[in-house]
Image: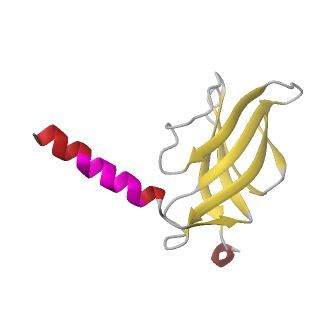
Amino acid sequence: MIRAALIALLMVGTSAVAQQKVQSGPGAMLRGLDKVSGQTVDVEMQSGETEAVFGLDVALGDCRYPVDNPTGDAFAYLTIWETGKADQLFDGWMIATSPALNALDHARYDVWVIRCITPAAD
């Protein structure tokens, strides 16, 4: 009985998030990590741009955020591949508040979304 109530509560919360109004920002702030050296770098990029993040090339397709809470979360569509190689390592949406949900799988480097660039942040 408790389990069914918990599942129902989770479903209600999920549908509310799924129906939340979002807006595309002009770009995103990403963070890269070199797991070997421990060095991090923050990269601000515009939608449609490709930037080098350590030994990776990262292309930003779009960054969306909740209209009612622009700093609350970010959903960025990224395509990532090793510099000089054609095979994609990652192609999909990354979520700032849940980076492990859909993460880059690379032995040395990590990339995740920090936030969208919003008109108020420019």
Please provide the residue range marked out in magenta: 8-16
> Where does the C terminus fall, quadrant-wise?
bottom right
Residue 7: image quadrant is top left
Query: Residue at the location (24% across, 48% down)?
Result: 8
Q: Does 6 appear above or below 28?
A: above
Q: Is residue 59 magenta?
A: no
x and y, in percent, of residue 30 in the image: 66, 50
Q: Is residue 56 left or right of residue 101?
A: right
Q: Does 111 appear above or below 24?
A: above
Query: Residue at the location (66% across, 25% down)?
Result: 108
> Where does the N terminus fall, quadrant-wise?
top left
Q: Is residue 121 left or right of residue 17?
A: right
x and y, in percent, of residue 5 in the image: 17, 46
Q: Relative to the observer, which residue lies in front, 55 or 9?
A: 9
Q: Is residue 11 magenta?
A: yes
Q: Relative to the observer, which residue lies in front, 104 or 10?
A: 10
Query: Residue at the location (67% across, 64% down)?
Result: 24
Q: Is residue 88 left or right of residue 36?
A: right
